[in-house]
Image (spheres, grey):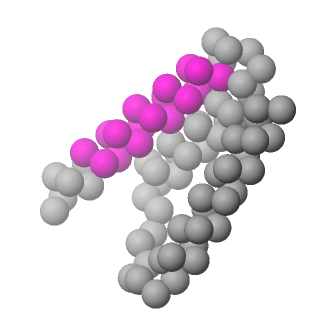
Amino acid sequence: MYILISIAVLLIIAILLFVVKKNKKEKKLTPLASLAFSFVLAGIIFGDDRLIGYSLLGIGVAIAIVDVILKRKKK
């Protein structure tokens, strides 16, 4: 049940971001950001086993933080 709610919320957020960013300059997803996103999704999907689910979520968040730091250093 929680997994379905999480996926629905993520879809709603993705749709809202797509609609809002329509008029703005497109920013492409970096390879690290897409990897982080896939780890977070895998953590949600495999959330039945808490050890695996939380580990995957943690890895995804850590990769996302590294991606943000690398983007800031480039600017």
Quadrant into which the C terminus falls: bottom left
**Magenta residues, start to end:** 53-69
Observer-nearest of 2 and 26 = 2
Residue 34 is left or right of residue 3, and the answer is left
Instruction: Work out which residue is located at the far top of the displayed protein and give it.
Output: 51
Residue 53: image location, x then y, percent: 65, 23
Instruction: Give the residue displayed 74% in from the left and 50% down from the top.
Output: 8
Residue drawn at 44 percent across, 78 percent down: 26
Relative height, residue 50 to residue 70 (above, below): above
Does residue 62 belong to the magenta stretch? yes
Q: Is residue 43 left or right of residue 57?
A: right
Q: Residue 39 at x, y = what percent? A: 58, 37
- Front one among 65 and 5: 5
Residue 41: in magenta span = no
- The picture places residue 13, in percent across and down from the top left corner, at 60, 58
Q: Which corner quadrant of the image does residue 19 belong to?
A: bottom right
Name the side, left or right, on which 20 lies relative to 11: left
* Quadrant (top left, top right, bottom left, bottom right) of the N terminus: top right
| Magenta segment main secondary structure | helix
Q: Is residue 49 above or below residue 14?
A: above
Which residue is pictured at 76% across the width and 32% down the height? 2
